[in-house]
Amino acid sequence: MENLNAERRLFINGALVDAEGGRTYDVINPATEEIAGVVASASLADADRAIAAARRCFDESDWSTNKARRTRALIQLRDGLKAASDAWRRQIVAESGCPIAFTHGPMLDSSVADIDYSLRLLATYPFERELEDLGSPMGGAARRLVCKEAAGVVVAITPWNAPVQTNLQKTIPALAAGCTVVLKAAHDTPWAATMLGRVASQCPDLPPGAFNVLTSSADGSLGAMLTADPRVDVVSFTGSTATGRRVMESAAKTIKRTLLELGGKSAMIILDDADFSRALVGASFVCANAGQGCVLNTRLLVPRSRYDEAIAILESIYRNVPYGDPTDRKNIMGPMINAAQRERVLAYIEKGKAEGARLVVGGGKPPRFAKGYYVEPTLFADVENTMTIAKEEIFGPVLVVIPFEDDEDAIRIANDSIYGLSGSVISASPERAMKVARRIRTGSMNVNGAFFFSPNAPFGGYKQSGIGREMGIEGFEEYLETKTIAVPVDFPAAAIAHASP
Ligand code: NAP
């Protein structure tokens, strides 16, 4: 077993601690199917202590009101994570099977670098503003201040497919806003969270309880408890739409603010005037991280008039997707996260065939790997948008190609989905492409190869892809409450002026 020096302990109330009774579970490397290490398996009592610590820190320390302290703490966290990034990279690849090349981008390095955006918001965000006096039905003049305050204790629950990115996307803006956080990692990717705990334990300006990290073997009970607990103010969840429904139900009992980043079945639309040889290259990106990405364009819409030409180009691309060992920098795709996910993807492929779609490339376990949860890059043609493989999120390296008649038909098909997370359009005509982009009911659109993702770009879904936004100013404001304070017009200025949070 490679010595990864991964952190196995929980982080609760400012200390790295073992789980109750010293319980641990094995972390499996999906590329080798071997045990890569162990990690603490938190109990409900551990989770209770984490919530209590976060609540106490929020209510009793100056964390939510001391912006200078939060700035220092985030700088310490960022610098510590940067210093740890090489060790962290090896841990993440080992636990998730994510291609190492992607850890030099959003899977690690750029997500850590994006902490700077939250620091920028901390320095520039207007936490208070005074309103124009438009009077009041109650009569009398007043000055009215709108104050943005930290929303309270945040429970952040994250998935395994982009674990560092989702952990940081939630934790950093929440901490910057002055909230305290309990992060619960996905059971398959605990080290993407425990490294945060290890580095946080070295940050002198982070008070005990401001940030807590829990890892636990899968039984759903920890997530259910965290989302129902009355001491928690906000639940920030990223995961499947099915679990998102349960989270919403559980949080509803105490009317918690709920941010949901859920699944997708996004469409890439190639209009009939596009240069196919260039446009279709992007379609192979569905195989990135073995298709385990919520924003991937897993439905490809091509004009019926050029359908055969498109399939011929795609067949050659899909036969040559570089995949295999995730530690090899040339691969864009490693294994599926675990055996169950591989079986789920293979079952979808069988369903596609049974419902009449034409399998062009792949469709099974690649024979060249004796070990590892691999699935071949898979291409389906002759797909109807009503088929299961076009409607449901497969979360594997499977592209379905759907023909359309004209631009209106393409828009109709793209929008005919319970999801609305992302999408793309490509056309030789910028005006035509933009017209289509504006009509798709989705949280982000990429036009002619440009990519929406950036630290200041709000990210989230329409429809059953979620509620709320992460990143950007909108993502920061998810962790703020709004309070209006009215004072008499002759109120002393010195009483109004105070250090904003
Ligand atoms: P998942 O099964 O929904 O799990 C997500 C997280 O929820 C895990 O930490 C899981 O813990 C936890 N959980 C399980 N049951 C729970 C419950 N009853 N209450 C609260 N939490 C519970 O999703 P996944 O399979 O890990 O991730 C893949 C999904 O995430 C895909 O659907 C993908 O589209 C979506 N995703 C969305 C975005 C986005 O921004 N929109 C980004 C990335 C991924 P355990 O691991 O312990 O079960």
Image: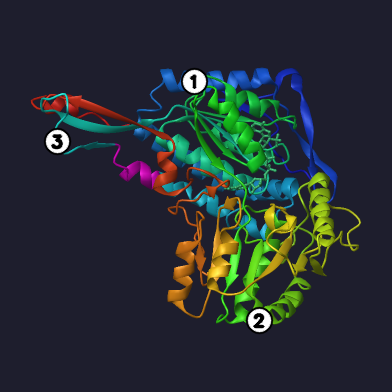
Mark nearer the N terminus (2 vs 1): 1
Which residue is painted at 31% across and 45% down in the image? 124
Q: Position of residue 117 (x, y in %)?
A: 42, 49
Q: Position of residue 423 (x, y in %)?
A: 56, 61
Position of residue 53 relative to residue 38, above or below, is above
**Quarter holding the N terminus?**
top right
Q: Visible in this render: residue 183?
A: no
Within 8 Å of ligand 1, the CB of disc 2?
Answer: no
Decide whether the magenta segment is chiefly helix, strand or loop.
helix
- Quarter of the picture for ligand 1? top right
Q: Nearer the viewer, residue 409 or 247?
A: 409
Q: Position of residue 190 (x, y in %)?
A: 69, 38
- Going by the numbered disc 2, the residue's amino acid type is Arg
**Numbered range of the magenta stretch:** 119-127
Q: Which residue is mark 3?
A: 133
- Going by the numbered disc 3, the residue's amino acid type is Asp
Q: Which residue is mark 1?
A: 55
